[in-house]
Image: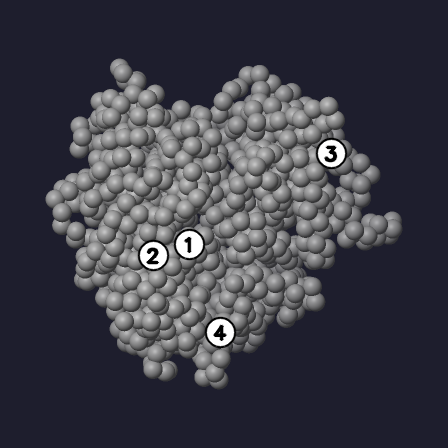
Amino acid sequence: MSTFFFFVQLLNAIQYALILYLVASGLTLLLGIMGVINLAHGAFYMVGAYIAFAVVQQFGNFWLTLPAGILIGLALGALIEKFLLSRLEGADHLSQVLLSFGLILLINEGQRLIFGNDPHGVEVPKILAASIPLSNTLSYPVYRLFVCAVGIVFIIAIGLIMAKSRIGMMLRASAENRDMARAMGIDVKFVYLGVTAVGIACTVLAGVIAAPLASVYPGMGDQVLIQSFVVIVLGGIGSLSGALVGSLLLGLVDAFGKQFFPNYAAFLVYAAMIAVLIVRPQGLVRSRGT
Amino acid sequence: MRKTDLLITRRSALKAVGGAAATGLLVRAFPTPAIAQAAPLRIGFMLPYTGTYASLAKNIDGAFRQYVEEKGGKLGGRSLEYVMVDDQAEPSKATDNMNKLVDRDKVDVVVGTVHSGVQMAMVKIARESGKLMIIPNAGADDATRSACAPNIFRTSFSNWQPCFPVGKVMAEKGHKTAMTITWKYAAGEEDVRAFKEGFGAVGGSVIGELYVPFPEVEFQSFLTQIAEKKPDAVFAFFAGGGAVKFVKDYAAAGLKKSVPLYGPGFLTDGTLQAQGEAAEGLLTTLHYADDLDNPTDKKFREGFKKKFNADADVYAVQGYDSAALLGVGLEAVKGDMKAADAMYKAMGAAKIDSPRGPLSFSASHNPIQNIYLREVKNGKNTFVKIAHANLADPGTGCKMS
Amino acid sequence: MNARLEKFDGAFLLLLAVAAAFVPFVLSGYEIKLATTITIQAGLAVALGFVVGPAGLTSVGHAAFYGVAAYILAMMSPKSGPADMLLTAAIAIFGAAAFALVVGAVSIRSRGMYFILMTIAFGQLGYHLFNDTGIGGKSDGSYVQFRPELHLFWTDVSFDKAPRFYMLVYVVVFLVVGACWWLRRSAFGSVLLAARDNEARTRAFGFSPYVVRLIAFVISGGMAGAMGYLTAAQHGFVAPQMLAWHASAFALVMVLIGGKDTTSGPAIGAILLLLAEEILQRWTEHWLVGVGLIIVVAVIAAPRGLVPFVAGLFAPKQAHHG
């Protein structure tokens, strides 16, 4: 393998890691702050992709999909917290696992009823449709670089919000100790509503942004769900920086695993994860929330 | 008092849920068999009505019924009734589902399925029960090789068939080296093996085989490897959402211009709308194309369009021909399925004027058919030429008892 | 578990055991095969309920143990004749238990969400092992050509006939359910409960919560393996999807619907869910909507499960909840 292609694979790894991070961050928020385990994460990602497909088909403009995804995601999250999750308060993770499993079935069938079973493509917006030539055979799609940029902006923004802002402080307090936060006058119920809404909106948005890359088809969320779990377990539950570390590690194992051990690439991902867990059961980055 | 109250509320709550399901969510109820004068023949469809392959199931089922309707609702003088079981493309439930048709619904014929894993479980029961089974899609080579049986017929293809001629096509274009890429699962491996056999026969050499874990769709790392090794051409097999993404990624990585992409037709069938510009100009091989323009095909496509307001595809053709094949058998025995031997003999010798062109059957009950070279033009898989005429699967290891 | 619930639990079990005994005499053909499937799944649910309930371990990876045992039978089955049932079953169950030991040893160190995620990961590892590497056949699955035979000293017993195979399943599931019932009420069960509810106290009494939980996990994994073995023998076919997390989650749904704090609950959950699936599938191709609604409603309305709910209905004065 030449140095040039080594760097191309490295770029692949980082680019994949940033997509993974975008996808996994919503799940991390729910896990870390709310202590909610959400198997329907992948289904929400699929919802985002289908929103992108529907909006582009209706209005022919990709940029409209972003606000649409955010709004629908927020609404979906708020509804789910208000009518389902809040009723589980105090219940164990088992109920959450099953509730979200039920949601998967409902969302998947809903998708089939509305959109049918055919795979669909979402056109890359015109200004990002080009590719940058890297060698005489290979070029890099600009849209992938755009997704990288979104990922990086997202990382910085969410890091600042969590560390510096009042909202971040409230979130951390609620995650640390629900009762204490309540005593200090934080409206925990409202915080939870907000977190679920934002967490699910993040996931939906990730689906929207990934749609032109991933194409849109039934069951597309399944892969994503398991990979997000791997990312989170690797990094440490509820830690956003952990999720970043986990994404990078998974991106590297994936890109180079496929190059050097192609027959065991999927296997390697889980092997890496179990190896990390044996050494550090709480993940690579210790979390605060749990 | 309280007790009874609660019991009642719970019961009525359950009822309400049931009612909601019945009125609001029922989109299409499965038809309950009407009591007929002369017992109609029971056809059991075992197809993936839900999940990734649902659109295939819909077209197979729909075109089968289309054929029967065109024949006045009867085959060999018998009217038909249908029972449907959703196999969800889920191999671990395949035996249960097949039992539903064979034991519970007592069907006379099983038509199914799409997914090879499910198919192999069905083959086992078909062999044990002796029930007539027509395979309208799944390509697992073994179904008409080592696991072949007198009561098992296939109207679609063996995985070997559409892939073997690709090598010849590549050689004609002057390609000497190739790489392969597919999902790491049985169908993908069978496809690659068939391609290598065909490419090797014309002196080509395969310089790399890439296997993507199924059903993963992150191809970037593999595309980089293709760019690094620079083969003359690439042979790829993916289907459905994976095919859409692969073809788009391949084009976006700039490889489409430097390393031409070939594959069996599944790469561009039912996916062209989603693939858009990225698929234009791709060459694929299959036993069908969108513009074969023979009279049967024209009539079939018009009928399908009228009935379902959608364009027919290769899967619909396979469903249509399944009905045609059953018709040949029933015709030969005047609708008496007890004369199984005579019926199977007639089916094995059937010469069907299919929308895909002439269709007959090999000794192992697999189609003998033309494999066409097609090019994607304006979002259609257009006919270029016959890549391999009347191609029969080798049927290795088939012993009909 | 309070005394009333315990009485109800026992009564339900007895009822189920008696009713199930009549199956081969009352039902025939397809119905016996359906009853066989449901009985096996009930056994799996009860085995899973044993770790979810008393041990407090929400395993979303039990299908892996179930599937591994099924694959062991498939790999050990000769192409030309039936395998020896006692030998293959022993190895399959032992293999499943050994896998559970590895998974448990690593996973039980963590609790709550981590445990859930790790069991999912191990389950997927098992799935990929059979799906990707070609061990035990290809991703399309592999056959058990002949149903295993029981070799006794004086004769060989074949289970090819559906009623007889059902009776075999009945006996095995009866033993598994009985063992879970007994274990829950034994001293071991009390220690498990204590470890779940108050870890420090358990330690003070000289028990390691980790070890007790691990033992429970391995027992349950072995039982799940027995069910996987029976499934492979029943269908003559195994596939990687048997190990995947969807299958594990589905088994958990059964446990929750019936009630994880009882032995009869998971069995009743399995029966209800599979019957609902059977009926819904006849109705509509969108039957998964029905299953999804059942799950969501069950989680919200009766999070403790049906058996505790019914037992609660008969409580003389207490407030009704659950």
Residue C139: x percent and y percent? Answer: 49, 51
Give the foreground label among 4 and 2.
2
The answer, for residue C227, to whether it is visible in the render is no
Residue B143: x percent and y percent? Answer: 41, 42
Label 2 packing within 10 angstroms: few (<14), some (14-19), many (20+):
many
The residue indicated by pointer 4 is A13
In 3D space, how far apart are the residues under numbered discs 4 and 2 (Cα atoms)? 32 Å
The answer, for residue B322, to whether it is visible in the render is yes
Rendered image: mark on residue B190: 1
Q: What amino acid is labelled 4 in the image?
A: Ala
What residue appears at the point 58 percent right and 20 percent down from the top-left corner?
A: C24
Residue C288: x percent and y percent? Answer: 43, 40
What residue appears at the point 69 percent right and 30 percent down from the top-left corner?
A: C151
Give the foreground label among 1 and 4.
1
Q: Secondary structure at mark 2?
A: helix
Is label 2 on the same chain as label 3?
no
In 3D space, how far apart are the residues under numbered discs 4 and 3 (Cα atoms)? 50 Å
Residue B105: x percent and y percent? Answer: 40, 25
Q: Residue A186, located in which quarter of the rendered image?
A: bottom right
The residue indicated by pointer 3 is C179
In 3D space, how far apart are the residues under numbered discs 1 and 3 (Cα atoms)? 46 Å
Question: Is residue C155 rendered to the left or right of residue C142?
Answer: right
Pointers 2 and 3 in contact (C-beta within 8 Å): no
Name the residue nearer the viewer: B289 or B50.
Answer: B289
Give the foreground label among 2 and 3.
2
Indicate the chain on which mark 2 is placed: B
Q: Secondary structure at mark 1?
A: helix
The residue indicated by pointer 2 is B163
Q: What amino acid is labelled 2 in the image?
A: Cys
Rendered image: mark on residue B6: none
Give the foreground label among 1 and 3.
1
